[in-house]
Image (cartoon, grey):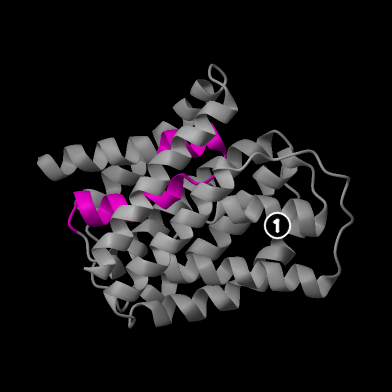
């Protein structure tokens, strides 16, 4: 019963973050599974991919209904990351827990720094060539496969700077990219990381999906900058905790 309650609460918080910030909430999924629910790093990243995939697909349907998804461009961008996500997803199950934890802590710290750094208006960007686009897609696929995160905080800036998407369409299309990468990274892991603990992962996922819907309404009542910086502080604390755990 305690695990069920923790899964529901943690899933709700992750969903609120995703719905309120449009990305980054999945960075809390792995630490929650490890430190609150007792998962090993390998099983936590596998379960995280499942949670990220389902939650992202749900959000994708919402954005698609509003016409904010560029299917062709998003599919091409995602296709560049699928081989990397699948290959690294299979490899990560063989990596020591300390390496996975350290890498995740570094990425979480980077995400927190990006959220806390003010973004100034810049001149309109020009869409990059296919080589740079493929490189960006492959990089995102690698991060998703290795650490089990959606990478929304990386996907949205990449779609804006590499493909010159407007913000609304970048957020919607990033969910297509994230969903595809998460599924590609999850498939090779299923035979190596053991059985998924559905009694925990199921409620966690359901709470995340419901929390994401509430997060959208919550975001409309509070300053986006306040939400973003509050989340960044929490994420920075999580990064410090995981790094200390990995080094001791």
Q: What residue sits right under mark 1 in the picture? A: 158
The relative height of residue 168 versus residue 133 in the rendered view (above or below) is: above
Q: Position of residue 39 (x, y in %)?
A: 21, 60
Task: Answer yes or no: is residue 148 visible.
Answer: no
Instruction: Choose top left, top right, bottom left or bottom right for residue 115.
Output: top right
Which residue sits furthest top? 221
Q: Residue at x 19, y 52 (%)?
A: 37
* Side of 154 where 206 appears, left or right: left
Q: Residue at x 50, y 47 (%)?
A: 24
Residue at the location (69% across, 40% down)? 119
Magenta span contains residue 29: yes
Q: Nearer the viewer, residue 44 or 236?
A: 236
- What type of secondary structure mainly makes up the magenta span? helix
Where residue 30 appears, as percent x and y from the top left, is 34, 56
Give percent across and percent down for residue 22.
57, 39
Q: Is residue 156 above or below residue 73?
A: above
Image x and y of residue 59, in percent: 55, 41
Q: Looking at the rendering, in which quadrant would you find the N terminus? A: top left
* Nearer-the-camera pick, 61 or 56: 56
Q: Is residue 154 left or right of residue 4?
A: right
* Magenta range: 15-38
From this viewpoint, which residue is outermost toward the left? Answer: 1
Task: Check disc 1 and report its element: helix, strand or loop.
Answer: helix
Residue 100 in view here: yes
Please tell me which residue lies in front, 39 or 97. 97
* Magenta stretch contains residue 51: no
């Amino acid at each position: 019963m305690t695990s069920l309650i923790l899964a529901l609460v943690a899933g709700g918080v992750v969903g609120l973050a995703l719905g309120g910030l449009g990305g980054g909430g999945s960075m809390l999924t792995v630490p929650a599974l490890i430190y609150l629910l007792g998962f090993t790093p390998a099983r936590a990243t596998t379960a995280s991919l499942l949670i990220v995939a389902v939650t992202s697909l749900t959000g994708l349907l919402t954005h698609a209904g509003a016409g904010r998804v560029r299917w062709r461009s998003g599919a091409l961008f995602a296709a560049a990351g699928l081989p990397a996500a699948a290959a690294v997803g299979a490899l990560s199950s063989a990596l020591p827990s300390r390496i996975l934890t350290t890498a995740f802590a570094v990425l979480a710290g980077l995400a927190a720094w990006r959220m806390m750094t003010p973004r100034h208006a810049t001149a309109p960007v020009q869409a990059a060539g296919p080589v740079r686009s493929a490189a960006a897609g492959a990089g995102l696929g690698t991060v998703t496969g290795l650490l089990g995160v959606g990478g929304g905080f990386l996907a949205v800036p990449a779609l804006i700077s590499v493909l010159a998407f407007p913000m609304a369409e970048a957020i919607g299309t990033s969910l297509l990219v994230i969903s595809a990468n998460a599924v590609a990274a999850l498939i090779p892991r299923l035979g190596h990381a053991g059985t998924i603990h559905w009694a925990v992962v199921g409620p966690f996922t359901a709470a995340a999906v419901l929390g994401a819907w509430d997060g959208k309404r919550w975001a409309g009542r509070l300053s986006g900058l306040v939400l973003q910086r509050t989340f960044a502080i929490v994420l920075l604390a999580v990064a410090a905790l995981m790094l200390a755990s990995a080094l001791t």
